Amino acid sequence: MLAYQHAYHAGNMADVHKHLALYGVIRHLHRKASAVTYIDTHAGRGIYPLSAPETRKLAEYRQGVAPLWDARNVIDSDTLLKAWLLALDPLQTSHEGGLTHYPGSPWWLAEGLRSQDRLQLFELHPGEHTQLTHQALPDNVRCRHADGLTGIVEMMPPSTPRVCALIDPSYERKEEYQEVADTLITLSHKVRHAIVLVWYPLLSAGRHHSMLERLRNAGVHKLWRSELRWRAPVTNGHGMYGSGLLVFNPPWGLDERLAASMECVLPVCSNEAHYHADWWMPESS
Ligand code: SAM
């Protein structure tokens, strides 16, 4: 079952949360010259024109990136959020300064890729994969029409000294939560130093709890959790009430940088919005 298309949701609050954290990790990795292999296990299309019919249908970006873009001139220039918003600038085609395009994770990963780095993109949906291969990407990027969870494990360990992966499934199948947990458990044994970001939806059904418990039971340490809620969870309710992110081996300072940016995000998110971050599993003693 591959019905999900990210174009319907591009630029929503979950994308803001996930891509902001990813951007923070990439900036941290670029402080050192040693090469990084980046992996995006569930890449999507790459760049989303906000005028596309699919994106306009739900127009989720209007409650996500768009109000932040509109407020960009008053956002504190020391924040990660400000730098992240400025990075969007070259993609925009409107002379009036409006937001016209929002990029997906492949673009955020490719944007600052250095000659020594590598980027591997996995996308299983044939149509999404074709669109991805039509994007202008640097020579050190490889797109594969393959299962990202199997693919990332097969790639490990890569030849570069450092590794950073984003695991961002659509969770169309309930089993994906366990599959993601199992993949992270395997990665934590194979490449102990890898930085891995795992995105998950916060749903009233609470499906992510089984994934978190599986990781705890498997003893995966150095696992940091960041959750953004735009409304309170409703029992038996439908839909996503927030966005969750687990980071294995989070870079030092990411928690503070993300928290400072979330102080700017929360007021434009909703008046019920709440941000919380903690260690799900700290470093083993
Ligand atoms: N990471 C993207 C971003 O942040 O812009 C969004 C990805 S979207 C949530 C999930 C994508 O994974 C979809 O494009 C879907 O077709 C793809 N997909 C689903 N199952 C997959 C699998 N097993 N391996 C690789 N891609 C898969």
Image (tube, rainbow, N blue to C red):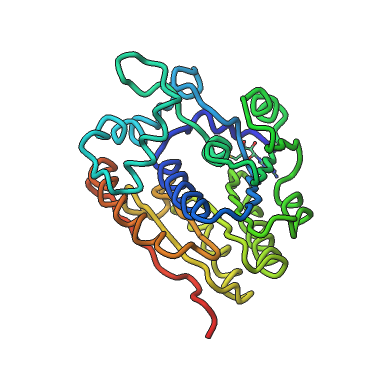
Which quadrant of the figure has residue 162? bottom right
Residue drawn 63% across the image and 30% down it: 137
Residue 238 in view, yes or no: no
The residue at the point 28 percent across, 48 percent down is: 78
Give residue 264's position: percent from left, percent from top.
26, 46
Percent position of residue 216, x then y: 56, 73
147 above or below 187? above
Q: Is residue 206 visible?
A: yes
Q: Position of residue 139 (x, y in %)?
A: 69, 33
Residue 61 or residue 82, whichever sits in front: 82
For the N terminus, which image quadrant? top right
Instruction: Please state which of residues 108 and 242 is positioned toward the viewer in this rendering.
Output: 108
Q: Residue furthest front?
A: 33
Examine the rendered structure and indicate whether residue 250 appears above or below residue 243: below
Q: Quadrant of ligand 1?
A: top right
Residue 206 horizontal/vertical position (percent)? 48, 58
In this view of the protein, which residue sits in the foreground, 260 or 138?
A: 138
Left/right placement of residue 164 relative to residue 224 reads: right
Q: Residue furthest top?
A: 95
